[in-house]
Image (cartoon, helix red, strand yellow):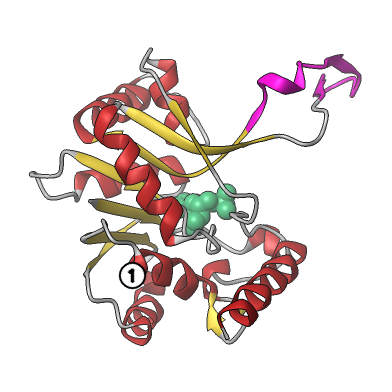
């Protein structure tokens, strides 16, 4: 399986002036933990790491330190996640039929979840890892700040990555999305918009997206628990 890792973001919401994926988490850069999960996956053979070229020297060091046995290709990213994934797709080998996309910022993903998504994408055109939401979600008017709707919680799932797709279909959706000036925050949204079915694979509650300093503290706690269990 071919894996694309969008890793070309910044550290703005983390309050950092560098890519947040370079921040330390339990003695390793955040990105190292994501790559470790990819290294341990049984089904991933090729990794495309999409980043800003300014970060490539650090990325190379991390790849070496992790001891990646699979091929890792550095791909220059864009100014949005959508653009970075589009550029990643352009750089997939032509023989790639299916692709797994996993955000570098979800560094607590397990190899098991990556492999479950790889297995599930063999029999459907698109899928996302997702978990049922625990909170009651409100739709709020952006100007009046008044609640306009409360969707039924049993229908609400929080989308995570990995997301996986048939490459040809996803490329078509990305190209059409660019032509239509559609801005989305995940690839599944493009797929859905153009009428393609997206299946759910049960994700993991610990598969957090590291966005703020609090997320980093929670991630450290979860990793310590995991490492203690394996000692
Ligand atoms: O900023 P956020 O955490 O939502 O980004 C999700 C993922 O997309 C991160 O792994 C980030 O590095 C990546 N990204 C990207 N290119 C951008 C912005 C974000 O690859 N221009």
- Number of marks drawn: 1
Instruction: Find residue 212 and report its image quarter.
Output: bottom right
Range of the magenta residues? 138-157
Q: In the image, 164: left or right of 158?
A: left
Residue 5 place in picture, x, y as percent: 38, 56
Q: Quadrant of the C terminus?
A: bottom right
- Disc 1 element: helix
**Is 202 inside the magenta-drawn segment?**
no
Foreground residue among 114 and 75? 114
For the point 51% across and 58% down, the residue is 109
Foreground residue among 196 and 225? 225
Q: In the image, 44: left or right of 80?
A: left
> Is there any visible trace of residue 185 in the rendered image?
yes
Q: In the image, 140: left or right of 188?
A: right
Instruction: Find residue 67 and report its image quarter.
Output: bottom left
Residue 86 place in picture, x, y as percent: 31, 41
**Is 156 inside the magenta-drawn segment?**
yes
Foreground residue among 156 and 178? 156
For the point 82% across and 17% down, the residue is 150
For the point 64% across and 81% down, the residue is 228
Residue 188 place in picture, x, y as percent: 44, 30
Q: Which residue is mark 1?
A: 39
Vertical placement of 132 versus 84: above or below?
A: above
Vertical placement of 23 versus 156: above or below?
A: below
Instruction: Find residue 171 and report its image quarter.
Output: top left
> Is there any visible trace of residue 84 in the rendered image?
no
Disc 1: CA contacts within 10 A as few (<14), some (14-19) or many (>=20): many
């Amino acid at each position: 399986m071919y894996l694309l890792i969008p890793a070309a973001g910044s550290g703005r919401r983390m309050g950092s002036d560098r890519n947040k994926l370079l921040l330390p988490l339990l003695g390793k850069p955040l990105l190292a933990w994501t790559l470790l999960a990819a290294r341990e996956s049984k089904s991933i053979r090729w990794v495309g790491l999409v980043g800003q070229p300014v970060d490539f020297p650090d990325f190379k060091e991390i790849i070496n330190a992790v001891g990646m046995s699979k091929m890792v290709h550095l791909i220059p990213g864009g100014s949005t996640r959508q653009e970075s994934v589009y550029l990643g797709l352009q750089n997939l080998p032509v023989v790639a039929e299916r692709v797994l996309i996993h955000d570098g910022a979800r560094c607590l993903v397990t190899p098991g979840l990556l492999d479950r998504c790889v297995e599930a994408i063999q029999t459907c055109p698109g899928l996302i890892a997702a978990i049922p939401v625990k909170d009651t979600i409100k739709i709020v008017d952006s100007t009046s700040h008044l609640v306009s709707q409360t969707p039924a919680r049993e229908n609400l799932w929080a989308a995570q990555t990995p997301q996986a797709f048939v490459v040809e279909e996803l490329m078509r959706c990305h190209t059409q999305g660019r032509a239509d000036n559609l801005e989305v925050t995940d690839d599944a949204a493009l797929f859905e918009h153009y009428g393609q079915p997206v299946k759910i694979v049960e994700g993991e509650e610990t598969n957090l997206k590291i966005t703020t300093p609090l997320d980093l503290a929670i991630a450290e706690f979860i990793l310590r628990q995991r490492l203690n269990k394996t000692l």
